[in-house]
Image: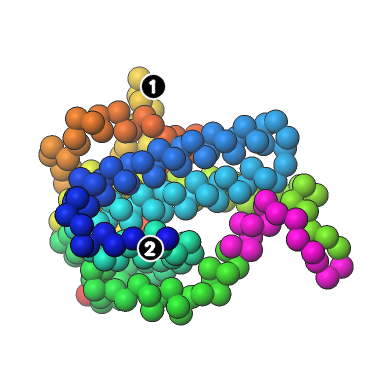
Amino acid sequence: MKYNFPNDAKFDSEYFLRLSIACRQNCGNLIKTANLIKKVSGLRHSMFCRYTASEELQKAIFCMLVHREYMKKEQISLIFAKHEAKIILYEKIFNVGSGLTIDNQEFILDGVPLKQLDLKRIIEENKEFGVQYMKKRNDCMYVRPGEKEIHSPSKEADFEQEETRMISEISTLNGLWEMLWKYEFKGKFSGLSCSRIITDGKPVYEISSTGGILVERKNYRPKWAEDVDEQVHSSNHTFYYDSELKKAT
């Protein structure tokens, strides 16, 4: 489905914040579904929901980037129009070693601000990554013919390691989302980290940085979003996000 965000005035900054939070809430529901499937049947099908939960949180991050004006509405249209787009772009922009730097509110990938990135080119150049991801994701749900035997997700029991990796990945995404929403980035950053502790039953985030200063934003939270922090807990891990950003020069 094609979206044309730039040409419609109703798609303002608050709209993308609402869209981001809705994606994050859906991530939480998908995690609950994954846990229920695993508990009831123990089948690998639960991983399909974890992969989808991760994708929803990736969408939430890109929407937050538009809300914070680090990316353009024209760019986010592609995220929703093509299924593999968010998977490829998150991997190439945010994963460790990607070449991402932050310089006074400007997110820069290999010298190019996110607002100026040719996202279509990045997706085209990394199509194979998207193909391999989709195969891994779909193998959690669908039966398919194989060269030697039929592939059935019900017969694949050894997925605990991948499940642990996905839980950690969702925690990483959640931490990045928190930082993008709540903080201003002052100076040049070569690293960011975020941990979570529970105080009085509520999460409290501890943020640290290398090479720059994180300043908590004032009045960033609309009244309709007052309870957003409690709406998704991806895991019991205290570790949320840790990225060694490429040192700014």
* SS state under label 1: loop
How many circles with numbers are drawn on the protein? 2
Which image quarter holds the C terminus? bottom left
Asked if residue 244 lies in the magenta stretch, the reply is no
Residues at marks 1 and 2, CA–CA distance in whole angstroms: 41 Å
Q: Is residue 83 above or below residue 213?
A: below
**49, 15: nearer the viewer:** 15
Asked whether 5 or 100 is in front, the reply is: 5
Task: Give me the residue at 26% from left, 77% from top.
Answer: 111
x and y percentages locating residue 209 in the rendered image: 27, 52
Residue drawn at the location 46% of the way across and 79% of the way down: 125
On residue 2, the disc is: 2
Q: Residue at x 70, y 46 (%)?
A: 44
Disc 1 or disc 2, which is closer to the eye?
2
Question: Can residue 31 be seen by looking at this rendering?
Answer: yes
Q: Amino acid at mark 1?
A: Gly
Q: Which residues are magenta?
A: 134-148
Labelled disc at residue 218: none
Q: Position of residue 174 (x, y in %)?
A: 39, 45
Displayed quadrant of residue 149 = bottom right
Q: Position of residue 135 (x, y in %)?
A: 64, 63
Quarter holding the N terminus? bottom left
Residue under pointer 1: 201
What x and y, as percent, mark residue 205? 32, 37
Type of amino acid under label 2: Lys
Viewer-nearest residue: 34 or 77: 77
Left or right relative to 217: residue 191: right
Residue 125 placement, left or right of 21:
right
